[in-house]
Image (spheres, grey):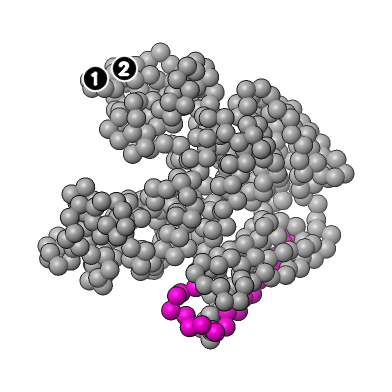
Amino acid sequence: VPAWLNDPTMYHNRGDSTWAGESATYGDFVGLDDLWTERPEVVSGMEKIYEKWVRDFDIDGFRIDTVKHVNMEFWTQWATALDAYAAKKGRDDFFMFGEVYSADTAVTSPYVTQGRLDSTLDFPFQDAARSYASQGGSAKRLASVFADDYTYTTDKANAYEQVTFLGNHDMGRIGTFLKQDDPKATDAELLAKDRLANELMFLGRGNPVVYYGDEQGFTGAGGDKDARQTMFASKTADYLDDDLLGTDRTHAEDAYDTNAPLYRQISALAELRRAHPALADGVQTERYAADRAGVYAFSRTDARTGTEYVVAFNNADDAEKATFATGSARMTFKGVYGTDGKVTSGTDKEVTVTVPARSAIVLKATGPLAKPATEPSVTLDPPAAGATGTVEIGAHAEGGQLNRVVFAAQVGNGKWKTLGSADHAPYKVTQTIDEKVPAGTALRYKAVVIDRTGRT
């Protein structure tokens, strides 16, 4: 109860938000008084509150609500201070992710690059995953989300840290969306789509989060209070008539069934990631995306061992074939999930895979990538002269293998700062140039390429 919280001058005092224009930032959040977060007293005061929690309770990180309803400068200062404090306490892996309720990466990513949070809740992934798994959407749309991953890259974070999910307490559950998208679908059809959505979340980049009850097949009538069923037997009429996917059980019974089909699948996917760490943090390289319902495929490659995994999904109603390049020629890939089969790449490094309807397969290379024949080289693509705001810096890397390109920038005579690193082509990062930088100021860039054998 710090005294400054009881000072009315520390609040915006604009009344309830209208959710438009400046009121989205300055207005009270449905009656919750809105702090004047532009004031230094509020910034330092909030820093002290959260530092105390880290100190007294060994907090590992924070999930931060309604981030886009606070000015960006607050997050930059607050997150930087909290990171530094956690590091002093020996918490180098301290993790802060924010709820930025938008399916547009142009809206979510600045809270990482400018706001200095480690991650945001990945609403763009959720939207694309629903489209692909539930609505039969094009694989290209899913690909477009991952194509924006470079916009999350900073000197301390990247898109691999994005927190992926399929539904939550505000918007509703994935089971709800499945039923809304196809009201006439059978339980078996809904279950197959639910399983595909889980596979998208667990086998792609990011930190997957399962909303409690989804593993039991919870659905519901919608979001907010309609998505907050209890795990124990309910007496709430609105919940008692909800369907549970994959089971005949109802909310009149406890829902802790470890034999529920979705529970078993999620458990198996979690175990698969533990057994094959590249599926959690391996380099993700897109291989194929149908311009319709059909196959979406990428590789997850262990940067340390050079072992490649091919992951392929299919949201079509029938089995689909796809032919695409891998990282190796004449390499045999054996199924570790969704198939017992194997395929061998040709001299052109291409494989042809068959993916069953509404499912995913994972194939593991039987050997590591061949050692790169040539040393890596890099050419830099700077932004155009006179560019302002958020600009892109790119690079082309030749030779090497599993190349990683690290970018740095200098504004005027300031210190060189690392912008971040890209681990797959197209190699790109962003930089936000402060509008206060005078016209004519020199911008200098460096790009360093490192291959998997350490050659630079």
Q: Is residue 397 left or right of residue 43?
A: right
Determine whether 193 is above or below 250 in the image: below
Which element carries disc 1, helix, strand or loop? Answer: helix
Image quarter where the C terminus lies is bottom right
Question: Percent from the top left, x then y, of residue 117?
Answer: 42, 59
Residue 249 makes an appearance in the image: yes
Magenta stretch contains residue 408:
no
Majority SS type along the magenta span: loop
Relative height, residue 429 to residue 179 (above, below): below
Q: Tell me where the magenta segment starts and ends, as one range.
A: 433-456
Is 451 placed left or right of 434 in the picture?
right
**Residue 214 horizontal/vertical position (percent):** 41, 29
Tag 2 residue: 241
Q: Which quarter of the picture shows residue 228?
A: top left
Residue drawn 71% across and 56% down? Answer: 402
Residue at 49% x, 52% y is: 105
Identify which residue, 278 or 433, lies in the foreground: 433
- Tell me where residue 231 appears, x and y as whole percent: 32, 27
Residue at 62% in and 72% down: 384
Question: Which residue lies at the image location 43% right of the left edge and 79% below the top edge?
Answer: 436
The numbered disc on residue 338 is none
- Distance from disc 2 to disc 1, alpha carbons, whole Å, reads 7 Å
Say if 167 sits above or below 42 in the image. Answer: above
Magenta stretch: residue 455 in it?
Answer: yes
Counting from the top left corner in percent of width and height, residue 394 is at 65, 65
On screen, residue 158 versus residue 119, left or right, reads: right
According to the picture, the residue beneath numbered tag 1 turns out to be 237
Q: Are marks 2 and 1 in contact (CB under 8 Å)?
A: yes
Residue at the right extreme, as displayed: 347
